Image (cartoon, grey):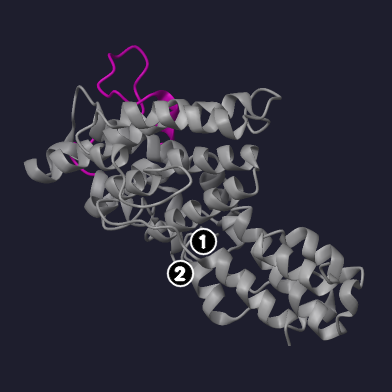
Amino acid sequence: METAREVLRTLARRYAFGDLAALCEAGAAGLRSDTAAEVRLLCSFGQRLIDLDAEDFGVPEVTGDPVVDAHKVPDHLLARARASRMPQSAKERTRGALRTLRPAYGLLLEVIEARWRRREMAALVAALHISAEYLPLLAWEPVLGHAGDPALLPAAVGGTGSRFGVMPQPGRPRECDLTRPEQSAAERALRVAGEPGPGWRAYLDRQHSTLASALGRCAASCRTPCDVITRLSPDVLESLTARCRLAGEFSDGALVRLRHAAPVGHGFGVPSPEEVEEAWGRTRRSVGKQPLGRAVAEPSTVYCLPGLPELFSAAAGCPILPDTLLHDVAARIVDVLDR
């Protein structure tokens, strides 16, 4: 028969951070007050990670309880989380996920696997939807040298000969394939670095993923390319186009479309694990027809959705593997419980 302390350890290893924190607050297992407070703080941090609450990644954890907040999350865990954080002002020095999306996609892979193990399909589908939205920025990262940071973007896509962010004039024929929302997001991205915090955060919340879509369209399917594309060398453009088309195929695939049947989308149903596997199988077959899709169809790693790490790696142009940040937070909690 499991002891109360063993139950707490099991909850930690299952990343059930909310349940574990509630039990500690209720005085379960007779934990010393300082031990319970430290566990609760770590659980607050871990829950933020598994919920993909990226705006607060890497900031000192605050629960509002002075006893709990007297403790701190270890600096090395905060630093790893900070690499996936969206900066909350244009002038913030640490650029996090605007500098590179690679740590964020490693965390996404770990979160997706954790949700699969816990059979939380609605949350899994939501994480897949997020990964699809920003995948074009991951594909553009080797070309831009950053992940679509508006503070740096004008130098890469603006200037004479570029129609990126130039809104169409009424009564004149369209010269750009971007949709109106995409062109609006592009126009905003080129000037938002000069806006105060509220405007910057509103852009990140509402338009940054649309910017990703715009850049993906420029590289993958533009029929009237402007200087955004023509300034690139043929070999760079060929590789970029292949990566963006791979991202587009994933985004349009059956797996990401499951979102529309889940509470995070427009319906009230939640897909079963079997439905997720079937949709991923169909997506893998369609993605496998892309020039970069062979590794997805024939994966070399073991993963709950076989080939997904290979897909992210192909889009990024470098290896993307599941992070161990959730695992390491859970291990830290177990260490605290074992004191």
Tell me if residue 160 is in the magenta stretch: yes
Residue that sits furthest to the left in the current view: 234
Outermost residue toward the bottom in this view: 339
Q: Position of residue 310 (x, y in %)?
A: 32, 47
Q: Dot 1, how many residues are within 10 Å of its Cα: few (below 14), some (14-19), or many (20+)? A: many
In the picture, which quadrant includes the N terminus? bottom right
For the residue labelled by badge 2, is the local secondary structure a helix, a strand or a loop?
Answer: loop
What distance separates the C-alpha of mark 1 from that of mark 2? 9 Å
Give how far across and how far down residue 189 sits, in percent: 41, 45
> What residue is rendered at 39% in x and 29% in y?
283
- At a point 45% along the width and 49% down the height, the residue shown is 192
Q: Quadrant of residue 23?
A: bottom right
User: Which label's residue is closer to the chain start, 1 or 2?
Assistant: 1
Q: Which mark is residue 94?
A: 2
Residue 123's tag is none
Q: Which residue is mark 1?
A: 85
What residue is rendered at 35% in x and 41% in y? Answer: 136
Name which residue type carries label 1.
Answer: Arg
Front label number (1 vs 2): 1
174 is higher (above) or lower (below) than 210: above
- The reply, left or right, for residue 7 in relation to residue 145 is right
- Estimate the x, y position of residue 27 in percent, counting from the top left: 91, 73
Front residue of this view, candidates 228 and 55:
55
Residues at circles 1 and 2 in contact by the CB criterion of under 8 Å:
yes
Q: Which residues are magenta?
A: 158-186
**Which quadrant holds the C terminus?**
bottom right
